[in-house]
Image: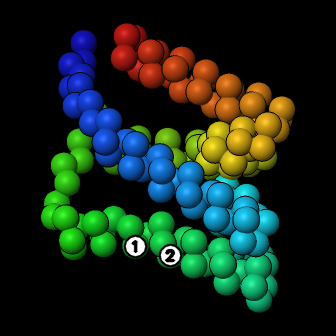
Amino acid sequence: MNTWATTPFEPWAGLAGGILIGTAVVLLQLTIGRIAGISGITAGAFTKRRFGQHWRLAFLAGLLLASPLYLLFAGPFPVQTQVSSLWMRVAGLMVGFGTRLGSGCTSGHGVAGIARFSPRSLVATLVFFGAAVITTNTIRYF
């Protein structure tokens, strides 16, 4: 049986992260009328041209630079995984497949879609989280 480490409860870090994500979603919607779903932003970065591509590339650059900037200004942060890097890659590919299958990702549906009262996003988010609960419990207890 595997032993699982618990994560310390850090409400202030979670609150700060939630505020930053919510602010980014609202600003993107108010300034250029676009939804902050990472799968759509990533796909558009490779298919759109001119302004449609520029803001997407800037958004992705911000995502990619966040960790190195945090490391530079705040120092190292502990990262612990319970699985090998191979399983992490497999999981990433499965998430990408699910994102295309579900016509969006958790950020697009779960943050921006639910905030706009989209029924499709509500169903997609319930499926995402239901699958996560089932997967987590299956891995932990079997």
User: How far from the left and from the top, in percent, is residue 45?
Assistant: 68, 75
> At x 73% / y 65%, what residue is drawn?
30
Colour scheme shown = rainbow
Q: Provide the secondary structure element on which disc 1 rests.
A: helix
**Mark 2 packing: few (<14 Cα in 10 Å), some, or many (20+)?**
few
Q: Evaluate if marks 1 and 2 touch, with contact meaning CB atoms under 8 Å apart.
A: yes
- Spot the residue most to the right: 119
- Tell me, yes or no, if residue 94 can be seen here: yes
Q: Is residue 37 left or right of residue 121?
A: left
> At x 44% / y 69%, what residue is drawn?
64
Q: Provide the secondary structure element on which disc 2 rests.
A: helix
Q: Amino acid at mark 2?
A: Ala
Q: 36 above or below 59?
A: above
Q: 49 above or below 106?
A: below
> At x 21% / y 71%, what residue is drawn?
73
- Quadrant of the image containing the C terminus: top left
The numbered mark at residue 75 is none
Q: Where is mark 2, residue-wise?
A: 61
Q: Nearer the viewer, residue 56 or 4?
A: 56
> At x 56% / y 51%, what residue is drawn?
22
Q: 12 above or below 25?
A: above
- Spot the residue most to the bottom: 50
- Tell me, yes or no, if residue 83 can be seen here: no
User: How far from the left and from the top, in percent, is residue 39?
Assistant: 67, 57
Q: Nearer the viewer, residue 89 or 3?
A: 3
Q: Give the CA distance from mark 1 to mark 2.
A: 6 Å
**Mark 1 packing: few (<14 Cα in 10 Å), some, or many (20+)?**
few
Q: Where is mark 1, residue-wise?
A: 65
